[in-house]
Amino acid sequence: MESKAIHCFLILLIISSICDASRLSQLNKTPLKSIESKDGDVIDCVHIYHQPAFDHPLLKDHVIQMRPKHQPEGLLAENRQLNRRKSITQLWQSSGSCPEETIPIRRTKQVDASGASFIPSINLHNKGANTELIGQAPTLQFVAALVGDDQYHGATANINVWEPQVQQSSDFSSSQLSFTAGSDVSNFDSIQAGWHVHPLLYGDSSTRLFIAYFTIHNSQTIGCFNLLCSGFVQTSNEIALGAAISPLSTFHGAQFGVDVLIFKDPSQDVWWLHYEGTPIGYWPSKLFADLANTASVITWGGSVLSSESDGQQTTTQMGSGHFPEEGFGGASYMRDLYLVDESLKLKPLGNPTTSAKQPNCYNITLGRNEGGGDFIFYGGPGRNPNCP
Ligand SMILES: *[C@@H]1O[C@H](CO)[C@@H](O)[C@H](O)[C@H]1NC(C)=O
């Protein structure tokens, strides 16, 4: 990318028209159709071969794989295929749809700030006896259930969807499934998917579907949310990354959750993302060093970034804003937690552990259904008498 830009700049000094080639590639991203959603978002239907992924130097000649060849085996997967309830939709879909061979891309507004590029991630500090979860930012709060003693090909969860209050526009609150691999905090790869409320990124406080990836190596970080940089290859013409999710759960009212599955198909060498039972797209393995093969740590949980300007925790909520002990309807849950190991089958987590950075602010509890699926309740209100 960088070398191309410099090249273009040098030519620009001589004959400006030579740079029309790069302007053309901009033009190519011109949407074939644009849809104005009632929530103010604009969804651009961009030709699938003009999506941001093709700006990645390693993906220039990439041939899109339109469907996963395999799904992880297991009863759960079959059940999900059969009993698919399409209860969760995206609001923009009521205003139109994107044609075949295009993908819906949420148009970035002016308000989207570059300061919104920080992607929270947690990783294991020392593998082994003194394993400890750490986050990259001192003001990052997190809770998670995690597995970290195998080589993982995938994981899934049904993630309860809420609209946590975010105190300051520089705070955010997210709930996600996350995969990492890598030796230490300055050398690792991460992919994640879930929902978040992130005012700096979107200019509002809606609950939105998000994905993210990044790689940190030799003090270089590459990555972003959604399709804001090149890397993720989207195949679906129905789901827009970064679009608002509806309906949302209400306190002791109706509960809604979204199914997220991330699965590395060894025969395709990509990490597929399935959302609500539908393949959305994938991260090609070649984007990564450590995640090129398998993941070493999987976490299910929530994070809150607080600006903490006065030295206090903010009142930014995680999950529903209620502590785990309030249970179903009160606290946010993730259920049907399964992982995929080298057998390529969905399995219960085995021996997961949980971690909460400051349980007086946000906490997590773990349980197991009779059928074998693990679940968590997680979240909290942030600042309170026990969390000053
Ligand atoms: C956090 O949750 C754990 C597990 O349920 C529980 O043992 C602990 O007491 C909780 N901590 C707080 C501060 O509520």
Image (cartoon, rainbow, N blue to C red):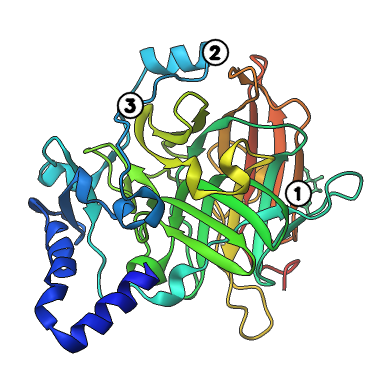
Q: CA distance from mark 3 to mark 1?
A: 36 Å
Q: Is residue 166 above or below residue 8?
A: above
Q: Is 240 displayed left or right of 352 in the figure? A: left
Residue identified by numbered label 1? 355
Q: Nearer the viewer, residue 146 or 357?
A: 146
Residue lying at the far bottom of the rendered structure: 13
| Pointer 3 with pointer 1, Cβ within 8 A | no
Question: From the image, which quarter does the N terminus lie in?
Answer: bottom left
Q: Which mark's residue is nearer the viewer, 2 or 1?
A: 2
Q: Which mark's residue is nearer the viewer, 2 or 3?
A: 3
Residue 174: image x %, image y %?
51, 55
Secondary structure category for the residue under label 3: loop
Q: Residue at x 48, y 23 (%)?
A: 267
Q: CA distance from mark 2 to mark 1?
A: 28 Å
Q: CA distance from mark 2 to mark 3?
A: 19 Å
- Mark yes or no: residue 193 visible: no
> For the residue carrying disc 3, how many other residues have a C-alpha within 10 Å: few (<14), some (14-19), or many (20+)?
some
Identified by mark 3, the residue type is Arg
Secondary structure category for the residue under label 2: loop
Residue 177: image x %, image y %?
55, 43
- The answer to which image quadrant residue 30 occupies is bottom left
Q: Earlier in the sequence, mark 2 or mark 1?
A: 2
Residue 67 - label? 3
Q: Earlier in the sequence, mark 3 or mark 1?
A: 3
Residue 165 - label? none
Q: Is 373 displayed left or right of 252 in the figure? A: right
Q: Nearer the viewer, residue 192 or 102?
A: 102
Residue lying at the far right of the rendered structure: 129
Residue identified by numbered label 2? 74
Identified by mark 2, the residue type is Gly
